[in-house]
Amino acid sequence: MKVLTCIIVLTALLVALPAHAEQVDLTRAYQKAQEYDARLRSARADNRAYKEEIGKARSQLLPSVRTNVSRGRSATQHISLGHAYPVDFYNTVNLGVSVRQPLFNLPALASYKQAKLLSVKSDVEFKKEGSSLILRITEAYCNALFAEDNLAFSKALVQATGEQLAQAKRRFKTGFGTRTDVEEAQAGYDTAQADGVEIFNSVEFSRRELEDLTGFYPEKLCKIVPEKLRLVRPQPDRVESWIEFARLGNLSIVSARQEEQIAKKEIQKQKGSRYPTIDLVGGRNYSESENNYSIGQIYDTYSISVQMSMPVYTGGYVSAAVRQAQAKWVKAGEQLSWQERGVESEVRKYYNGVVSNISLIKAYEQAVNSREIALVGTQKGYEAGLRSNVEVLDAQQKLFASRRNLAKSRYQYILNTLMLKQTTGPLTLADLEEVNGCLTSSQ
């Protein structure tokens, strides 16, 4: 039954992966994600929408032209002292055009400046989303690679425990082993098989996560080459320098700073509504028999004037709007301070993460070498009758655990490096290609 289970799992794996599937590297996955990712496409549309706010606000400062045209048929009957006069039928024509040019409008001017700030902030948010996509695609790709590494480690552990089980059975038959050794080897083999099924499912899940970003299922991924992975401490090698860079270039801080400026313009706009607005208005109106008092008469009128409008009393609306805008400005300032403190914490976290990952990788590389030597020694001791089967199984599990931790540390080093760079500014394609340079086609 257990052999049948293994055959089914391996068959499913072979069916799932085509024989000549195209390999997908990190750069190609990112290119696909740029076209498919819903978050990036939504941010792009949002950016276009905010840019139109400039045109809408500018229109309030430019001339506006209106025209009206009407033509109709009217009938008028005059009744006086009980006597009804014949009905008069006549055509009516009315043509008019007017031009209005704002001369002084503080709220409209503040709205225009505010719209430009909104556009700049939208550009920052769009750039931030593009940078986030680089990080998200790299994280999903690393997760998929780590799941494949786990599957490879699991297969190796199943093979090793299977060989250990076969050896325990042979020793038991020849009288050099015990039933306990066989049962312990069987338990280790069964546990390794069960873990392998769970890890196989995680491989499929991680690839589906990558598919959600790219729009296609990656059949084969490029593997990481440890020799190409350069372990470099952050430069400059001072966390305070990175914090200063982040305060100037972090996109979240830049966006929060723009939001504070937008809130400040809102105060100016609300205060400006207390002042008069002055418009230059010109027009022409042509009418024929416009009403029953001007039947058969034609009027052609030209006019030009300067109009002023000023609120005298609004019931406290303007004062309330100003206080509301001031409160939002204070809120924006506090959010900026909160964002700066949060980014400083992230810089320290990712800086220390990069440094610690370098140490962990070197430590786990040494641990793997030591575990390999220890496993060989334990196996020889078991064959000589000096070690137990439990010790061999324990040595095997520790070796594969060290290999798994080493792989995890390498991927975490890559992600922490990108996250540290992202805290000081947007990630670029060059950052992605640097990671992609550590990959190679798997055989």
Image: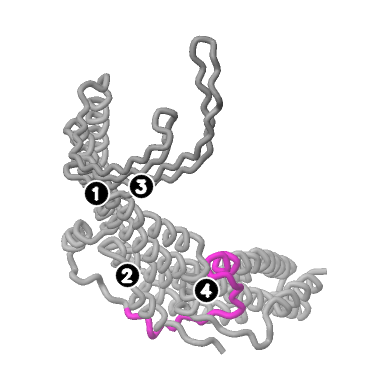
Earlier residue among tags 4 and 2: 4
Quarter of the rendering containing residue 234: bottom left
Q: Which mark is residue 145?
A: 4
Of tags 3 and 1, the one toward the viewer is 3
Q: Would you say residue 338 is visible in this rendering?
A: no
Closer to us: 443 or 270: 270
Q: Amino acid at mark 2?
A: Ser
Label 1 SS: loop
Q: Is residue 423 above or below residue 267?
A: below
Determine whether label 3 and label 2 are within 8 Å by CB: no
For label 2, the SS is: helix
Camera-side residue of 255 and 267:
267
Query: Which residue does the numbered mark 1 point to in the structure image?
Result: 61
Q: Where does the magenta region start and end?
A: 207-230
- Could you tell me the amino acid type at mark 3? Arg
User: How far is disc 4 from disc 3 in space, using C-alphas?
Assistant: 64 Å
* Residue 208 seen in the figure: yes
Q: CA distance from mark 3 to mark 2?
A: 73 Å
Give the CA distance from mark 2 to mark 1: 62 Å
Q: Residues within 10 Å of mark 2 (few under 14, many from 20)?
A: some
Residue type of the residue flagged with mark 1: Leu
Q: Is residue 439 above or below residue 303?
A: below
Residue in view at x 29 percent, y 58 percent:
251
Q: Look at discs 4 and 2 and give the one toward the viewer.
A: 4
Report which residue position mark 3 lands on: 66
Residue 277 x %, y % = 19, 37
Crowdedness of circle 3 by 10 Å Cα count: few (<14), some, many (20+)? few
- Image quadrant in which you'd find residue 211: bottom right
